[in-house]
């Protein structure tokens, strides 16, 4: 029973921890590639500012270093953000937000180049069905020069204005992209991730039986009501779990009392049985004594009924 209560508590704690807000790392300007010397701001956006978020990174030189520890300047004014006024080539690596409570945010891979061409591509995963625009950009000249775009090493197309839009991306568009501007050079490669779009299938409509009343919610009210119902359902689950833990703990504490009461009941029953046996033996001894007394009286009466008399014997004479 004690193990069951401990498991219930652990499950309750895990359920409550699932409601912890998770930060989302954003990059400004929104790009996964930067020229050396650019200004970059990375923010940990989340609702619960008391979680104590900080920014960490892994590079080829350092592991799990924190913003402000030799690089960047940490700020908590509006959002938890790390501002890098001059980004170096060795700043290339993986960045993420981490709180003192344990959860971490999404990870972002940033590439810093000392060349003259970069590919501006989405930093975060792209939702399936959305449009994605890629921009091939130079450091000194205008960014509307003709550029060639490649995916996984193969040429996709050449664009005269230096940008390419992929409409209604699918999982097949996921891959490693780069661009090339003639007489300027080639950009580093960046991976574009495409996530599956979550679609909700509406329940099949059914015709209500005759005499029943159907209630249809307005479309504008449905999402808030569903949100409220979802919140109420979560609260009910937590309350039920708390009640379950209390019941289990109460049953564990009541068990010794029940055993003691059962022991007392057994003692009472044993005492009653012993009294009944003693009483039965006593009554039996009385009945035996009465029967013995009656036998003695009967024997005395029978002895007094016997009488002794004198017998005369006559001799019979024969007739003549």
Image: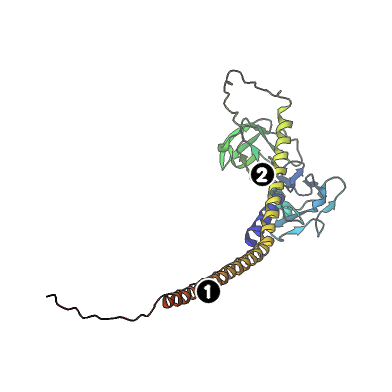
Alpha carbon distance from label 2 to label 1: 117 Å
Q: Quadrant of the C terminus?
A: bottom left
Q: Bin the neighbour count of mark 2 within 10 Å (Cα to Cα): few under 14, some 14-19, many 20 and up.
A: many
What kind of element bears circle 2?
loop
Location of mark 2 (residue): 187
**Residue reaching furthest top?**
210
Front position in the image: 153 or 66: 66
Answer yes or no: is residue 117 visible. Answer: no
Q: Which quarter of the picture shows residue 222?
A: top right
Residue 242 x, y percent position in the rendering: 71, 51
Residue 228 x, y percent position in the rendering: 74, 35
Judged by depth in the image, the label closer to the viewer, 2 or 1, is 1
Residue 173, placed above or below residue 255:
above
Name which residue lies at 63% across and 58% down: 4
**Residue reaching furthest left?**
320
Location of mark 1 (residue): 285
Front position in the image: 20 or 181: 20
Q: Quadrant of the N terminus?
A: bottom right
What kind of element bears circle 1?
helix
Front position in the image: 74 or 102: 102
């Amino acid at each position: 029973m004690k193990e069951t209560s401990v498991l219930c508590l652990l499950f309750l704690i895990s359920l409550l921890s699932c409601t912890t807000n998770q930060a989302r790392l954003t990059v400004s300007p929104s790009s996964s590639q930067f020229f050396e010397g650019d200004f970059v701001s990375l923010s940990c956006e989340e609702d619960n500012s008391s979680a104590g978020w900080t920014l960490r990174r892994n590079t080829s030189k350092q592991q799990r270093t924190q913003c402000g520890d030799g690089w960047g300047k940490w700020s908590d004014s509006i959002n938890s953000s790390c501002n890098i006024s001059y980004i170096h080539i060795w700043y290339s690596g993986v960045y993420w937000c981490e709180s003192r409570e344990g959860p971490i945010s999404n990870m972002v891979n940033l590439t810093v180049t000392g060349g003259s061409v970069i590919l501006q591509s989405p930093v975060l995963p792209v939702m399936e069905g959305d449009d994605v625009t890629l921009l091939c950009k130079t450091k000194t000249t205008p960014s509307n020069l003709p550029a060639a775009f490649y995916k996984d090493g193969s040429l996709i197309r050449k664009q005269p204005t230096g940008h390419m839009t992929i409409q209604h991306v699918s999982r097949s568009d996921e891959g490693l992209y780069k661009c090339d501007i003639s007489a300027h050079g080639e950009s580093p490669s960046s991976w574009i991730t495409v996530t599956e779009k979550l679609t909700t299938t509406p329940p099949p409509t059914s015709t209500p039986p005759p005499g029943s009343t159907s209630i249809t919610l307005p479309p504008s009210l449905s999402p808030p009501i569903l949100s409220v119902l979802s919140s109420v359902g979560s609260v009910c689950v937590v309350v039920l779990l708390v009640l379950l833990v209390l019941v289990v703990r109460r049953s564990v504490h009541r068990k010794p009392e029940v055993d003691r009461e059962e022991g007392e009941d057994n003692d009472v029953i044993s005492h009653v049985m012993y009294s009944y046996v003693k009483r039965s033996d006593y009554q039996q001894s009385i009945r035996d004594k009465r029967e013995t007394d009656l036998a003695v009286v009967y024997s005395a009466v029978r002895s007094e009924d016997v009488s002794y008399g004198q017998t005369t014997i006559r001799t019979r004479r024969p007739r003549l």
